[in-house]
């Protein structure tokens, strides 16, 4: 499709690393590739079960809304005769109740353990983000890890605005109109410049974080909105 110019954007619903080469080839032919994933707060990529190489190769990463997942899947936590019958009808198979077994001590499932891990991580994060009020009447700020993250986001905002300013200085009005028509998607060359400049200041590891990338791109668009 990229070779035939039959599409300008492809949405990829997969996290397999072996697709990275195909994504790069499609990008070389002018196609933008948006990676769709399930949100995962404790992942630095922001999504679950996605290879890092593929995530960094894609132009954008967008999370699938929880409402869509809830409407497409049914979460079964325990045996439900009614649900089993409905499933059996769909599958055209007889509904059989599970054989009675002796009671076993409760063992947490991987899902339960994941919830505990997430809750623990959130607790640690919240304890680090302490609001500090100055006795001099200045605006409240943050200290510890929260202050460091706020600093990084501020740097990303500055870089995004500077790239937008530099781009406007060497572009034409028609190119600006063409860019605005594709909003919020950015051309690969502009996006790569944003990421490269940010990586030089914050380091590649920090630039890989989705919060930093979103801030970079948002700052670019916000600067254009002020000028336009």
Image (cartoon, rainbow, N blue to C red):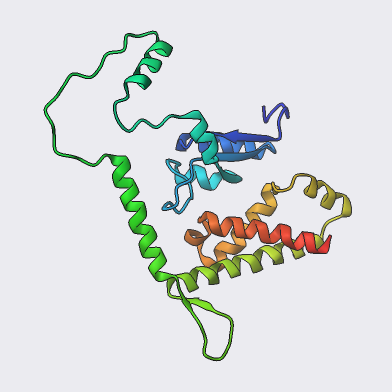
Q: Residue furthest right?
A: 173
Examine the rendered structure and indicate whether residue 219 appears above or below residue 36. Answer: below
Q: Position of residue 86 (x, y in %)?
A: 40, 16
Q: Residue furthest bottom?
A: 136
Query: Which quadrant of the figure has residue 81?
Result: top left
Q: Residue furthest left?
A: 102
Examine the rendered structure and indicate whether residue 210 appears above or below residue 72. Answer: below
Q: Position of residue 165 (x, y in %)?
A: 76, 65
Query: Which quadrant of the figure has residue 61?
Result: top right
Viewer-nearest residue: 104 or 50: 104
The residue shown at (82%, 60%) is 170
The residue shown at (14%, 38%) is 105
Viewer-nearest residue: 103 or 93: 103
Q: How many marks?
A: 0
Which quarter of the rendering shows the N terminus? top right
Question: In the image, is 88 to the left or to the right of 33?
Answer: left
Q: Position of residue 179 (x, y in %)?
A: 78, 49
Examine the rendered structure and indicate whether residue 171 appears above or below residue 77. Answer: below
Visible residue check, residue 169: no
Question: In the image, is 171 to the left or to the right of 64?
Answer: right
Which quarter of the rendering shows the C terminus? bottom right
Q: Position of residue 158 (x, y in %)?
A: 65, 69
Query: Which quadrant of the figure has residue 96?
Result: top left
The residue shown at (53%, 59%) is 207
The residue shown at (40%, 70%) is 128
Q: Residue furthest front?
A: 82
Visible residue check, residue 175: yes
Examine the rendered structure and indicate whether residue 29 appears above or below residue 157. Answer: above
């Amino acid at each position: 499709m990229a070779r035939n110019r039959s599409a300008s954007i492809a949405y990829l619903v997969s996290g397999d690393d072996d697709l990275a080469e195909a994504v790069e080839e499609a990008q070389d032919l002018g196609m933008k590739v948006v990676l769709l994933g399930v949100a995962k707060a404790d992942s630095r990529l922001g999504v679950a079960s996605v290879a890092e190489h593929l995530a960094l190769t894609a132009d954008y990463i967008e999370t699938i809304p929880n409402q869509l997942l809830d409407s497409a899947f049914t979460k079964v936590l325990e045996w439900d005769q009614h649900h089993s019958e409905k499933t059996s009808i769909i599958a055209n198979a007889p509904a059989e109740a599970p054989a009675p077994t002796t009671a076993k001590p409760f063992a947490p499932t991987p899902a339960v353990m994941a919830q505990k891990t997430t809750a623990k991580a959130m607790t640690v994060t919240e304890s680090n983000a302490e609001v500090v009020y100055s006795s001099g009447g200045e605006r409240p700020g943050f200290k510890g890890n929260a202050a460091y993250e706020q600093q990084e986001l501020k740097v990303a905002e500055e870089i995004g605005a500077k790239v937008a300013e530099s781009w406007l200085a060497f572009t034409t009005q028609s190119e600006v109109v063409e860019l605005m028509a594709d909003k919020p998607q950015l051309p690969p060359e502009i996006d790569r410049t944003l990421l490269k400049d940010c990586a030089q200041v914050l380091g590649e590891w920090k630039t890989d974080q989705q919060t930093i990338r979103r801030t970079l791109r948002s700052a670019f668009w916000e600067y254009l909105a002020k000028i336009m």
